[in-house]
Image (spheres, rainbow, N blue to C red):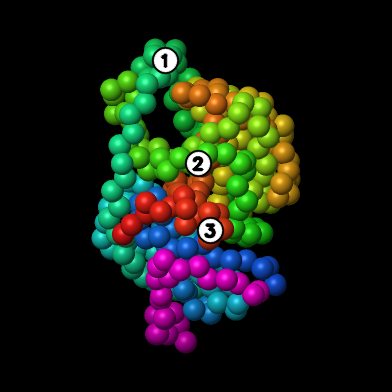
Amino acid sequence: MTPQKKRFNIVLLAFTTLMSTSGWGLSLPPSRPVPGGIVVLDLDSIQQTATYNGQPVMVINNEDKYYAIIGIPLSAKPGSHTLELTAGGDTYSIHFQVLEKNYPTQRLTIKNKRKVNPNKQDMERIIREKKRIQQAMSYWSDQPPQDLKFRPPIAGIRSDSFGSRRIFNGQPRKPHSGMDIAAVEGTAIHAPADGTVIDIGDYFFNGNSVFIDHGQGLITMYMHLSEINVNERQHLKTGDLIGKVGQTGRVTGPHLHWGISLNDARIDPALFLDNSEAATISQSIKP
């Protein structure tokens, strides 16, 4: 029976967490069908590949069923969105809804004015770095993640500024695409899950940064570090030292900017923490 003829029970798993009892011990993240959120789709029991917005999408087997785990970009418009699927040589589409989400506005004052209005030389550097960062964010490896629930990389005061419209020195900029965790400079940062370091570097805006691949388009990033304690291509286990909190790049004080990219969409890191922490950090998420 071809995928077109089979009746699929495509279920949007909104605002729930599915606990796995498979050999992996995986638990699926909660579905938050909003810009900057995640959509979890039940694909029934047929193995298939998926794409969304031209990007490959994570598909995992959990309790003998397949699920697509889709990152929704902050730029996504509310309404119907399409997931393209291929199984057994056949291609077809399924649709899901993205709901509206209004994020707050955050106003910040940056002392180093070049970090707000870069000069020509700065812009040349920024353009080069943008290509490199994009390459890391869209990185894909076929190996599925070892876990989809993360430990916090550090203990600290976590802001709820993910997705907020940022205004630096009175000038609007792109929405904030990560979680800021304030901590004393030099605080150790640990890997929240197993992964492989795919890039490290000192960036104009992000400062000292580390990018880790966790599998199938799931990338975590750590920015503004005072020092980096890993090397490219290094394999990490949960809890391994990544680096230390700093205030490099564009900052107002020492903190860790922790970001997560899924199928090249920046999503709220709180969705990958355990239920109690996600409930506290993501309390502003409302459909």
**x, y (%) of residue 161?**
40, 40
Q: Is residue 279 left or right of residue 24?
A: left
Q: Quadrant of residue 39?
A: bottom left
Of marks 1 and 3, the one in the foreground: 3
Q: Are marks 1 and 2 in contact (CB under 8 Å)?
A: no
Residue in the image at 51% along x and 28% along y: 206
Q: Which residue is mark 2?
A: 158
Q: CA distance from mark 1 to mark 3?
A: 37 Å
Q: Which residue is mark 3?
A: 276
Q: Which residues, given as a range, are shown in magenta?
A: 1-22
Q: Which residue is mark 1?
A: 111
Residue in the image at 40% along x and 85% along y: 7
Q: Quadrant of the C terminus?
A: bottom left
The three-letter code of the residue at mark 2 reads: Arg
Query: Disc 2 on helix, strand or loop?
Result: strand
Q: Is 142 in front, or is 98?
A: 98
Q: Is residue 255 left or right of residue 35?
A: right
121 w.r.t. 198: above or below: above
**x, y (%) of residue 174?**
35, 34
Mark sitting earlier along the chain (1/2): 1
Query: Dot 1 surroundings within 10 Å: few (below 14), some, or many (20 or more)?
Result: few
Q: CA distance from mark 3 to mark 2?
A: 14 Å
